[in-house]
Amino acid sequence: MARLWKLLALVLAVSLPVAVQSQSAAAAPADKYVLADRIFADYVLDAHIPGLVYGIVIDGQLVHVGTYGVQDLDSKRPVTRDSLFRIASMTKAFTALTVLKLRDDGRLRLDAPAADYVPELRTWKYPTEDTAPLRVRDLLNHVSGFVTDDPWGDRQQPLAEADFTQMLRAGVPFTSTPGTRMEYSNLGYALLGRIITNVSQQPYADTITSTLLQPLAMASSGFDVEKAPLERRALGYRWEDDAWRIEPTMGPGVFGAMGGLQTSANDYAKWVGYLLSAWPARDGVDSGPVRRSTVRELQQGSNYPSLRKRSGKSGATACRLPTAYGMGMNAATDCDLGSMLVHSGGYPGYGSHVLLLPDRGIGIFAFANRTYAGASAPVWDAAIALDEAGLLGKEREMPVSADLANAYRTLGAMYAAGNLAGAQDQLGVNFLLDRDAAHWSRELAKLKAGVGDCDTNSAVEPTGALSGDYTWRCTHGRLSGSLSLTPTQPPRIQEWVIEPLAP
């Protein structure tokens, strides 16, 4: 017990967060992220974490890093932003994006049977005679019909290629019919690793490295853990019998495609910044290494959504998140934070989590060196606390297209005139069929009698390039509504909603 208290004291002694300011954050006060620092400090203590690092990425820059505890308990080396942690299932996004890049290069098809690329699957027996062949896409979206296999899959990391081949030849049981529901599967992503290996004709780890890690200058990241310098490695521990016990280091093997990557906060921040740079869709140079539209496919779910509780302390009272598994990432919508991509990593000796807010250009991630550390809770608690403090900014504003701006001016002119006489060439073919000009004149006269003249110069809030909402301040009240344009060239006004705002 004395040794335990000494180790706890050591963790507390080095649990002082270190801030790294980017140029964009240079003017921020030094304690800007103190709320998050305190959350992670409490978590490290309460959850018996030997060492942890977390980072905040904004607009491609690592603006803040917090480090706590030690990389390993014997040397007492403190965690730094260059400490190397295994990130477990957060590896899956790297595997998924590499598969998508092979698709972009014309080397595989997502809707092709997986057996086209892994011959051992051709003799598999499916649950029913009418089961469609298992597709590459099914593996990406976790709709393969395999049983959830976290405890088993996590221990298969060093499985040899020959042993995996024998396992596939023998066939695997299905817990459900492929393509009928989402169920998380590490085996599915190990199969994607085999597909990458067979299609690229080199080990999946080499292909992921050349496709993503090297172009992104993630020089410290890799799949063969013991090739990294020992002095930078965060060794993995489990908390058992009121003491930390070291977990055996698992070497590289076929299941590394589902969870074997080792990386640092500095390196992983480059990955987070790269993913976030794919939003919003836009013109301009697309420098890769994978095109922006392909990166955005990671958000595309398999149409088997679920409602989940938010992680962290606010989860008990917050609204539940509609969630669907995309490709290596969970796509979700939170009532406070908005649209997001999230994923956890749990592994013998490690736990990690990443939360991306693509519409804000912000990412928060954390790595810890304790078995199944559950790092999602402090990441979410930090995100909510920072958002409530106004430190995560707002969603990027959608630009107003020229067509929408022109149609919005037409609405103002029609209201001012009290009729549609001067704007009929701006109306869709349906507009006067749905309500004729005489009825529109009577409706506008009724609105004017109630609220008077309006300032129609307020900004329209676009909901797309061809639709938007608005609110006008008038002499005796306000009017609000929406407009949408036709899917024609040129676009015309197909619908105009205008009504008084209730007091």
Image (tube, rainbow, N blue to C red):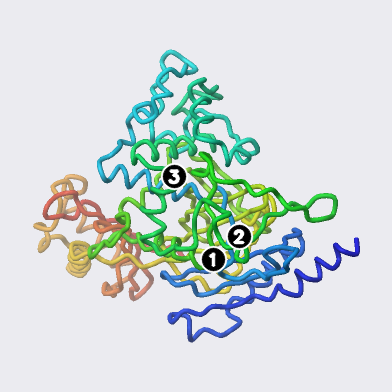
Camera-nearest residue between 199 and 408: 199
Q: Image check: 391 left or right of 73?
A: left
The amino acid type of the residue labelled 1 equals Ala
* Quadrant (top left, top right, bottom left, bottom right) of the N terminus: bottom right
Badge 2 or badge 1: first in the primary sequence: 1
Residues at discs 2 and 1 in contact (Cβ within 8 Å): yes
Q: Residue at label 1?
A: 265
Residue depth check, mark 1 versus mark 3: number of the one nearer the observer: 1
Q: CA distance from mark 1 to mark 3?
A: 24 Å
In the depicted structure, whether residue 416 falls above or below residue 322: below
Q: Residue at label 2?
A: 367
Question: What is the x, y in percent for residue 272?
Answer: 45, 62
Neighbourhood count class around disc 3 (C-alpha, 10 Å): few under 14, some 14–19, many 20 upward: many
The amino acid type of the residue labelled 3 equals Gly
The numbered dot on residue 326 is 3
Residue depth check, mark 2 versus mark 3: number of the one nearer the observer: 2
Q: Residue at x 59, y 34 (%)?
A: 148
